[in-house]
Image (tube, rainbow, N blue to C red):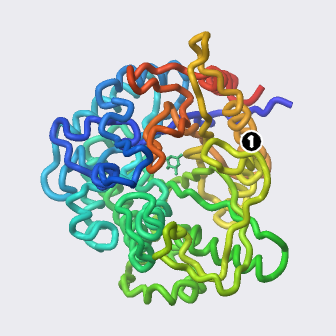
C-alpha cells in the first residue's frame, strides 16, 4: 500500500551551523565552546574540528541549489550565535547577520521555507567563561540574541526554534562530558536544564515581542524508553529515566511544572535552588509546534544499588540511581544505534496523547552509514534508504493513529562534523568529499526526491 501524506505536509532536511559552516574566524565570528572543545586534545575523534567542516560559509549557494534539487519545502538550519554576536552580549556583527540574511533570501527565492534554530550547541565562548548554562544570566543573553534575530530575519522566517536537544546540552555537556563544555558535574547539568528551559521561555517571549506573528517551537530528542520487563521495578526505572530525560523538559514548557517525583529522583545531586519564583510561568509560554528528533530506542531495567558516578572514566549522561540500560539484539547503524522504526510511531502517538493539540514535526531522523564513492562515481547507500523508508512509514502510521505530524526533516542534507565523532560518521543524503569539498548526491538523495515528489512512499 502506498503511504500518502496529508496535503501540505512539509518535507525538509536539516543541518546545524557548527557542523557545516567552517570559517570559524572569518568576518568577525567569535569563538564558540565547540571551537575550544574540538581543539582540546582527546575530545573529538582523530582531533578533528569544525574549522572547515563543509565550508558551507563559502559554498552556501551551491548548498541551496542542492536543496532546491532535492525538492524540499523547508530547510532546518541553525544560526551560529558567535557569528552574529561574537561574545554573546553587546554588539552584533553585521557581516554575520548578512550571511544569514543572504541565505534566507536565497532559500525563499528557491521556494524553500527556512526553519531557524537559534541554538544548536555553539555557545559563544565568552559566555562559557562566565559560567555558560550553569549561570542564569546566559538565559537573558539568549533572549536578547533571539530578539535581535527575530527583528532581523522575522519578516521572512516564520517558524523559529529556540533550542535543539537541550538534553544533549545539559547532560552530554555537563554530566558525561562527551560534548562541549565537557563537564562532569551532575548538579551543573541539572542547573543547566533549568536555565535552558528558562532561556526557551524568555526566548519565545522575545521573539513574539519582536514579531507578533512569529511562530515558535522547541526541538527535543525525546528518549524512546522501553522497560526490560513488565515488572514494577523495571517500569519504575523506565519512568524515572523518562522524568530526567523527557518530562524534565516537556512538563515545564508545555504544562508549567516539573514532575513532582523528579525532585526526589535528583535529591542526591541538587536542591534545585536555581528555580526562582515565576520561572515556571516564564518557561510555560504558548508555542506553535514541537519538534522531535528520533534515531533509536533504549531498553531500561531496575538496578538497585547502581549509583550514578560522574567520576568514572565514562560517566553516563543519565543522572539517575538504581537503573541500567540493556542492549537488545538487532540491526544497528554505523553509530551503533539500534534500528527500531516502531519506536517513532509510539513516541509520536504517546506524545500526542499526553499533549493533545500541539502540532508535531519530526525535525531530525536519519542513519549513519560507512559510505564510500563507488567505482562508478556514485555513492550507493541502500541501508540508509531502508532506514528512511521504514521511519517515514512509521511517521505515516502515527498520522493514521491521529498524531498531528505536519513535517519531516531528514538528517542531514550532507555529511558533516558529527560532534565528538568528527567526520567519521556520515549521515548525509549528499556525500561530502572533504579533501575537495565536492558534494555527491547519494542514492538516498534521489530516493528522497521521489518521496517528496509523490508526497509519500511508493
Ligand atoms: C542529533 C543532533 C544533530 C546530529 C544528529 C546525528 O543529536 O541534533 O546535530 O548530530 O544527532
| Above or below, 74 relative to 344 | above
User: Where's residue 28, x and y in %?
Assistant: 15, 41
User: Where's residue 206, x and y in %?
Assistant: 31, 59
Residue sitting at x 73%, y 60%: 327
> Quarter of the image containing the N terminus?
top right
> Quarter of the image containing the C terminus?
top right
Q: Nearer the viewer, residue 309 or 153?
A: 309
Name the residue that disc number 1 marks: 396
The image quadrant of residue 146 is bottom left
Ligand 1 within 8 Å of disc 1? The answer is: no
Dot 1, crowdedness within 10 Å: few (<14), some or many (≥20)? Answer: many
Visible in this render: residue 158? no
Visible in this render: residue 54? yes
Horizontally, residue 67 falls left or right of residue 388, namely left
User: Where's residue 69, x and y in %?
Assistant: 52, 18
Residue sitting at x 21%, y 69%: 130
Q: Nearer the viewer, residue 395 or 87?
A: 87
The image quadrant of residue 367 is top right
User: Where's residue 442, x and y in %?
Assistant: 59, 22
Residue sitting at x 84%, y 74%: 230
- Total labels: the figure holds 1
The image quadrant of residue 58 is top left
- Identify the element where label 1 is drawn: helix
Amino acid at each position: 500500500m502506498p503511504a500518502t501524506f496529508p496535503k501540505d505536509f512539509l518535507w525538509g532536511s536539516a543541518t546545524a551551523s557548527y557542523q557545516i559552516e567552517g570559517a570559524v574566524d572569518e568576518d568577525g565570528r567569535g569563538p564558540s565552546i565547540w571551537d575550544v572543545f574540538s581543539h582540546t586534545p582527546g575530545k573529538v575523534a582523530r582531533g578533528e574540528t569544525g574549522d572547515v567542516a563543509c565550508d558551507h560559509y563559502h559554498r552556501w549557494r551551491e548548498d541551496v541549489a542542492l536543496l532546491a534539487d532535492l525538492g524540499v519545502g523547508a530547510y532546518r538550519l541553525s544560526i551560529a550565535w558567535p557569528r552574529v554576536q561574537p561574545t554573546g552580549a553587546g554588539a552584533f556583527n553585521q557581516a554575520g547577520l548578512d550571511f544569514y540574511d543572504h541565505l534566507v533570501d536565497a532559500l525563499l527565492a528557491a521556494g524553500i521555507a527556512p526553519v531557524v534554530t537559534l541554538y544548536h550547541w555553539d555557545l559563544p565562548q565568552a559566555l562559557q567563561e562566565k559560567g555558560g548554562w550553569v549561570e542564569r544570566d546566559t538565559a537573558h543573553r539568549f533572549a536578547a540574541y533571539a530578539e535581535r534575530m527575530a527583528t532581523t530575519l522575522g519578516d521572512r522566517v516564520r517558524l523559529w526554534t529556540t533550542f535543539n536537544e537541550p538534553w544533549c546540552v545539559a547532560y552530554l555537556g555537563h554530566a558525561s562530558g562527551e560534548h562541549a563544555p565537557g563537564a562532569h558535574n551532575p548538579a551543573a547539568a541539572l542547573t543547566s536544564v533549568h536555565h535552558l528551559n528558562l532561556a526557551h521561555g524568555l526566548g519565545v517571549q522575545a521573539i513574539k515581542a519582536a514579531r507578533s506573528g512569529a511562530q515558535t517551537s522547541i526541538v527535543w530528542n525525546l528518549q524512546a524508553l522501553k522497560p526490560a520487563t513488565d515488572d514494577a521495578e523495571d517500569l519504575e526505572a523506565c519512568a524515572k529515566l523518562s522524568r530526567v530525560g523527557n518530562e524534565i523538559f516537556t512538563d515545564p514548557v508545555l504544562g508549567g511544572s516539573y514532575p513532582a517525583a523528579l525532585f526526589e529522583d535528583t535529591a542526591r545531586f541538587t536542591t534545585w535552588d536555581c528555580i526562582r519564583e515565576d520561572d515556571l510561568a516564564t518557561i510555560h509560554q504558548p508555542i506553535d509546534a514541537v519538534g522531535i528528533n528520533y534515531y533509536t530506542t533504549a531498553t531500561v531495567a531496575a538496578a538497585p544499588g547502581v549509583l550514578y558516578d560522574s567520576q568514572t572514566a565514562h560517566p553516563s549522561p543519565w543522572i539517575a540511581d538504581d537503573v541500567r540500560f540493556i542492549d537488545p539484539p538487532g540491526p544497528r547503524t554505523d553509530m551503533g544505534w539500534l534500528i527500531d522504526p516502531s519506536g517513532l510511531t509510539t513516541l509520536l502517538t504517546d506524545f500526542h496523547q499526553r499533549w493533545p493539540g500541539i502540532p508535531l514535526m519530526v525535525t531530525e531522523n536519519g542513519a549513519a552509514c560507512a559510505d564510500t564513492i563507488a567505482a562508478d562515481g556514485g555513492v550507493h547507500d541502500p541501508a540508509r534508504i531502508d532506514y528512511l523508508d521504514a521511519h517515514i512509514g512509521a511517521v505515516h502510521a502515527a498520522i493514521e493513529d491521529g498524531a498531528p505530524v505536519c513535517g519531516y526533516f531528514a538528517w542531514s542534507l550532507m555529511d558533516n562534523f558529527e560532534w565528538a565523532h568528527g567526520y567519521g560518521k556520515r549521515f548525509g543524503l549528499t556525500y561530502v568529499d572533504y579533501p575537495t569539498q565536492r558534494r555527491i548526491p547519494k542514492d538516498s538523495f534521489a530516493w528522497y526526491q521521489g518521496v517528496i515528489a509523490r508526497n509519500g512512499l511508493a
